[in-house]
Image: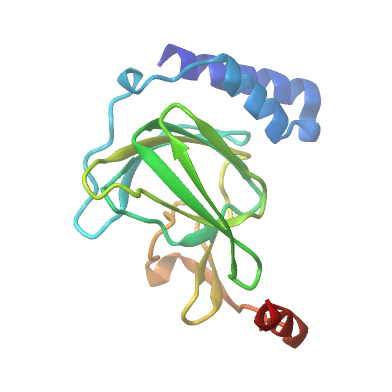
Amino acid sequence: MKNLQAITDRVSERYKEMGNTFNINQLRSILRDLETPLEDFELPEPPADGMPYSRKVLFRNDILEVVLLRWNPAAESSIHDHGNSYGIIRVLSGILNFQIYDNYLRELALGSVPAIDTFDLPEGIIHKMFNPSRYNEAVSLNFYCPNIDGMSLYDPVLREKLTVSHNNKAWNPQPKDILSREKLPDIPEEVQSDENAE
């Protein structure tokens, strides 16, 4: 994991130089220069029954969190955001799709990311991830800056936003991990009318 060490060192150095002006563009620039091939990593154990993925935290400090995820075939996360953190996801094997939502949980965009490609998750973006393959696992290396604290999950049935503890995954939380619940706003009538007119 020599290149991962180089990434974390560079992020720390740049953050010391730039402070809070360090942003997703600087993180992307650092990642662009350094490869992280799948064979450099020891995968987490396969996901437990009923879980979409397993995860292993490879690095975590106040500035950066790096997590390796192993996705089951046809698995998907809950709809979630990463609180005040932004992220870049690098797919190491397989394919991962992502779905983006607005604050009303309406679907905005769908994307697909093949192995060795990356995609950005700006701060506050509401999304879910899923492995579209019915037969093959996917593996992703997720970089979050600063480390994730205050992630939220979204329940589209109850239309609730659940703020969860920092050690929670983007999956159904245990009651002890839910810090707060908040009702999502109703879609304004003028927005509904515009949608019906299309």
Determine whether 162 is above or below 93 in the image: below
79 horizontally vs 185: left or right: left
Q: Is residue 49 left or right of residue 79?
A: left
Residue sitting at x 35%, y 48%: 131
Quadrant of the rendered structure where residue 150 is? Answer: bottom right
Percent from the top left, x then y, of residue 147?
Answer: 57, 41
Mark count: 0
Query: Residue placed at 62% from the left, 78% from the top?
Result: 184
Identify the residue shown where x is 63% and y is 46%. 85
Residue 74, position as x, y percentages in the image: 29, 53
Q: Position of residue 52 (x, y in %)?
A: 31, 54
Residue at the spot 43% in from the left edge and 34% down from the top edge: 114
Residue closer to the observer: 111 or 118 = 111
Of 71 and 54, nearer the camera is 71
User: Compared with residue 126, is residue 92 higher up or lower down, i.e. above or below?
Assistant: above
Name the image quarter holding residue 20: top right
User: x and y percent of residue 112 in the render?
Assistant: 47, 44
Q: Quadrant of the C terminus?
A: bottom right
